[in-house]
Amino acid sequence: MAGWPAALLWDVDGTLAETELLGHRLAFNRAFAEAGLPWQWDEALYGQLLRISGGRERIRQFLTEVESTPPSCDRVEQLQAAKQRHYRALVASGAVVLRPGVKRLLRAAAAQGLRQVIVTTSGRSAVAALLEQALPDHAALIEWWVCGEDVPCKKPHPAAYQQALQHLQLPPTAALALEDSANGVAAAAAAGVPVLVTRSGSSVAEPAALFAAAAAELDQLGEPEAPCVVRRGPACREGCVTLSYLQQLLPAA
């Protein structure tokens, strides 16, 4: 196992699954409709709103802009609670599935004794809903979660990655982050953690310059029947991201 990352630090939304466009966005819209509000976030608008980390923060900023006054905390909490309820229902229906290669790599890493941690701005209940539906054996694969409510500042701030490294008692360069967004890359890079990016449907239009700190950028992690495409970084001859491929992304000793 020498030379492999000692730990994999997994983002959730957009990295494990296409949750943003197929889950969270629809859940926000259903929460608005349920509250009798006239707004529907299309993909283009939602892509802009994703620059704001966190559901509550996104609701607060949007309402402030469209209503020209900040909403009350109670109103934000009510909308967020409704959104979380609708998100859990969407996930339970099977509308959100893991991206190609995610389950394969999670299990391969666990089989070789690599430690794995969730590092996300998403709330704990949303993470639980996804993992319980899409990855029932997650407790055997992932040892710890850092979620949005666990840190004072969300991505692109490095606090979540710093907390994960503290839990693991590892230096930053011994771990590898898996991300999909510019905010995620910025957070990992600020914590000194090397990053592999697989852009999602919600981050594909973000400027390339915002991903420059990543060690590699691929379209997905890859499956034998659906090989990954390397957009930047070492060639992936197997067509699937393996532990040996991840080893190439760590800084030279």
Image (cartoon, rainbow, N blue to C red):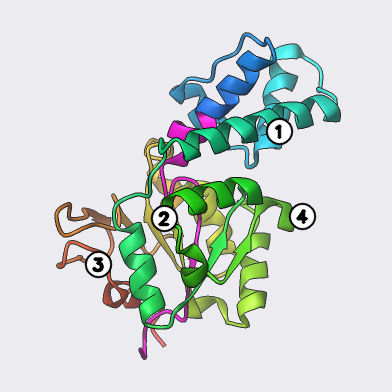
x and y, in percent, of residue 22 in the image: 43, 33
Residue position marked by numbered label 4 in the rendering: 152
Question: Mark 3 or mark 2: which is in front?
Answer: 3
Alpha-carbon span between mark 3 and mark 2: 14 Å
Pick whichever of labels 1 and 4 is earlier in the sequence: 1
- CA separation in Å, label 1 and label 4: 20 Å
Which of disc 3 and disc 4 is earlier in sequence?
Answer: 4
Circle nearer the viewer, 1 or 4: 1
10 Å crowding of disc 2: few (<14), some (14-19), many (20+): some
Q: Between marks 4 and 2, how big is the CA–CA gap?
A: 26 Å
Of 215 and 60, the residue lying toward us:
60
Which tag, 1 or 2, sits closer to the chain's start? Answer: 1
Query: Which residue has dot 1 on it?
Result: 81
CB under 8 Å between callouts 4 and 3?
Answer: no
213 up-or-down from 28: above or below: below
Residue 183 placement, left or right of 113: right
Say whether disc 3 or disc 2 marks the residue closer to the N-terminus. 2
